[in-house]
Each structure stands twice: as C-alpha cells, then as structure tokens.
Amino acid sequence: MQNIYTVKRCKLLLATAGALLCGTFARAQSVQLPYQYQFYQKFNADVYSTSNNIHTAFKPLLIDSSLTARYDSLMNYGADSNRHGWVYRKLFREHLFDVRKADYTFYADYLPDLTIGRDFKSKESTWLNTRGFQIGGTIGTKFSFYTSGFENQGRFAPYIDDYVRTTRMIPGQAYDRKGGIEQTKDWSYVTAVISYTPIKQLNFTLGQDKNFIGDGYRSMLLSDYATNYPFFRTTLTLGPIQYTAMWAHMQDRQAPKFDTFGDSRRKWAAFHYIDWTISNRASLGFFNAYIASEADDEGNRRGFDVNFINPVFFASSLGPSGMPGNSISGFNGKYKFLNKHAIYGQLVLDRVKGREGKAINSTAWQVGVRGADLFGVRNLNYLAEYNTAQPYTYIGAQRMSGYTAFSEPLAHPFGANFRETLGILNYSAGRFDLQGKMIYAKYGLDEAGTLDNYGKNILRGFNGDAIPGTSTGQGISTSLKYAEATVGFIINPRYNLKFEVGGILRQQTNRLGTSNTTLLTVGLRSTFRNLYSDF
C-alpha cells in the first residue's frame, strides 16, 4: 500500500508540474544539484572557497553561477570534437533521450543498479536487481522538474537483513513488500520534484524526496537517511540571510492503529532554518522542527495546530490536551579556516516531554573538519567527524511524535544514545572515483524481553517514568567498527553510470556476542542517490 500511495502522490505532483510548467517562461535558476555525498565532493573546491559566500547547509543545492562551470565540466567529461555513432554517444556521453531547445530542455534515462556480492563470514551471497528511470527538464529558467522510479529485488548481508526484519524497511528506500520475513526483499519507490523560482531571491519546491541540513557526512538536524516523504519547501534569500520553511507529511506502518487509520499512521512535520553567511569564511544557522501525529494511539484526532503555519522560530505548543507534539531546536555553523578547508558543527536542544508531564533535557552535537585538494592534490577530499546524542534525544511522548519517518530516524541513523567517530577520503582522477570510509561507534542497546528503555530506539514513546538514567551509552554497551572502500569507473557522467567494486568490513560487539561481516561486491551502478549501509 505504501507504494500505491507513493505512486498516487507522485502522479499528483507531476500533474501539478504539468499545469505549472505550461504557464510561463522566465529567467531565474531553479535546477537542483542532486544530493549524493561522493558526487558533492567534486564541488568542494568551489563550495568551500574563501572567494565566495554561498549558502551550503541546506541540500540539495540549487545550481547557481558559482557551481555552473564545475557542473558542466563534470557532465561533459570525455566530450571531444570527433563524430561518434548514436550508440557510443548514448553509452558514454549523453542522456538516452536529450532535447535541448532555447526555451525548454528534456532528458530521460534508464537507471540500472545490478550488483552481486559475497559475505565471506556468513558464507552467503548477496545481490541487487534494480531497474529504474529518471526524467527531468526545464521550461524557461524559472521551472524545473524531475522524477525517478525504482523497482527492486535483492538479498543483503545478515546485519542489513536483521534491520529489515525489525523495521520492515529497506534502509532509506521503502517498505519491504514481504514484511522483512523472507530472505529475498522486494520494494519500489519514486521521487518527484518541481521547482519554481519566480525571482532570483525566491524558490518554491514541491516534491516527494529527501532533504539534508549541514556540512558533514551525517546530520544531527535533518538527514537524507529516512525514506522519501512528500513536502513543500520555500526558500527566501536576501543577501547574507537565507530563510527556508518546509512542511512535510510522513507515515509509520508499524505504529499502533485502529480501523480508521488504514494500514499506516500519519503525522505532520514543519521545519524552519535560517542561514546567515557572516562573511566569506563564516556562517551560522538556526533550526527548528515540530512533529505531531494526526491522531493519538486511541484514535483521537488532533485539532488544528497553528505551529504548522507559524513562520516564527522556536515556536512550539503542547497542542490538544494529552496529545503533545515534539519540538526540536538546533544550530549549525561552519568556518573556512583556510581556502577550501572548513570546520563545522551542529547542536541539537531537545526537551523531551512525556505523557505524564515529566520531562528531561537532552542534547546532540557534531563537530568536524573537511576540505578539498588535500596536500595540493587536486580532487583529493577529506572529512573527519564526531557525532553524539544523549539518550532519549528526538523521542516523542508517543511513537508517532518521534523524529522519524516510516520507522527510520530523520537525523542520525543510530537514533540516540551513541558516540561516533568517522573519517572519509575520496579521490577523482579522470573517470575513476575512489572512496574510503572508517567508522568507530559506541552505543547502548535495550535489553530484549524487558520494558526498560535506555534511550537509543527513538520509536519508543517516552513516559518519563523509571528511566534507567541519562548517561550516553547506557544499556547493553555495544561497539561498532566499520570500514568501506569503493572503486568506480564512470561510464556515463550524465546519470553516473559506473562499474564499481566495493568492500565492507563490519564488526559489532557486546556481551551477547560478536557479529562480523566481510562483504565484497561488484556491479553496474547508476543514479545520484545515497544508499546507506554504514550502521
């Protein structure tokens, strides 16, 4: 049913897009730069240059004059003056369908993601069979549109299989049609986005997609880890100040429900973010999110809440009696201490209120450093980052007011009650992309078969009674060691078609035992999207 609802929403978005796109032409930029971590690293030298002061926190970015030259050079890599046949051009240089006229553009591609692998610890084979498409274009320079869809079947390493069995979600993608109980998973999902920029300073975006706030690999404010959700976003830029307001509609298939709920419970989310570029080197952002369910666990519908249309920062209320919402506030900042190099950080402030009126204060924060052209080597990028969240951060009084979408965290994949240190190096040379990643984390798990809530699982409602404590790492003390490396050869830069070899080493250890993964994969991959397995 999730996929039926998703397709219906995207048809509505595309119909709306058609109506809007037929209306007018203009001259302002509205094309999004698709957010995929490794792809974005190719823009680091421009984004973190001390010669500009562009707003970098809210992603996807819009392709403006500061990014156009680099984007065009990446998309046209390998182009030459020689005449080539149709097959050569479509395979190595162009979109499958590509129309470029003075007043509109249109493109379409087939997106395969076909991999096979072997986990040498469990002695199990893995595979992924994805058939996808993308369609996009512009009309004038005010409107852009984009949609993609993916039909998938696959088998995963045991630790991901356990995740799907617990959440019934393929990480960051969609609900498993087989409910997570069969070894072969089956799922599909779509994205759809239309963007309208009536004037240079103002943009409206309607879509079903993901959003990300921050300059790090992870985000403690809003990340792209959870599955796609429908949203409406408006962005106003006035000199050094950029204000973004976004409203979203989210679901949870596993929350307690009555007949009136159908097969999914639903909730609303409102996000506000103000980004201030203090100078070419420094920026500071202010964040606020408000989450509330359509109804409580007993089926009582929520009344109208002004917070969902309130543009004022840090506004929150309890809403109707006995049905509190969940308000989260935070800060984001960066400082370019050298040209192409920056330190960055985030802070989350969350006052967790339970159903009985009891409350605790919890925090999460991030600090990191990143840069481009390390040691003077062009396209050698690095990132080092530390993330931590106290127990019960992001938790709501009830499951549906938690900071989640479709049973997955909207911020860090670990939820709360953890500490994490990670480092990433990536390098691009010609058609080759190389990336290495290492993660070490410690977190506390809940005891199976007990009602104790140690604060990591943010899907569990908080009632404020008899909590074990607020020490980060409480519960079953668990350590995670994770290393991943990929080598890719880009076949067609237009839709990131590449041949890729990858490897994962993972070890999770606690007093209950040790789980090891040694996974090697090889395949033909495409698209600009983040698929996370580093948890």
Image: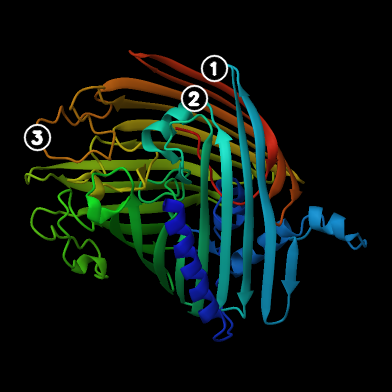
**Label 1 environment density (alpha carbons within 10 Å; few <14, some 14–19, many ≥20):** some
From what the image shows, is residue 4 above or below residue 442? below
Question: Residue 260 occupies which quadrant of the picture?
Answer: bottom left
Earlier in the chain: of badge 1 and badge 2, it is 1
Answer whether residue 132 is visible to the viewer in this image.
Answer: yes
The answer to whether marks 3 and 2 mark residues whose Cβ atoms lie closer than 8 Å is no
The residue singled out by tag 1 in the image is: 122
Q: Residues within 10 Å of mark 2 (few under 14, many from 20)?
A: some
Residue mark closest to the camera, 3 vs 1: 1
Find residue 31 and report its horizontal and vertical position in percent: 57, 68
How far is disc 3 from disc 1 in space, using C-alphas?
41 Å
Position of 313 with respect to 8 (left or right) is: left
Front position in the image: 8 or 58: 8
Residue at the spot of label 2: 158
Query: In this view of the protein, which residue sits in the foreground, 66 or 205?
Result: 205
**Comes first in the chain, label 3 or label 1:** 1
Instruction: Please state which amino acid type lies under the numbered disc 1.
Output: Ser
First in sequence: mark 3 vs mark 2: 2
The answer to whether the residue labelled 3 contacts the one labelled 1, judged by CB atoms less than 8 Å apart, is: no
Tag 2: amino acid: Pro
**Corner quadrant of residue 287:** bottom left
Q: Residue at x 57, y 55 (%)?
A: 149
Q: Can you give x and y, in whole percent of width and height, for residue 140 in the image? A: 62, 81
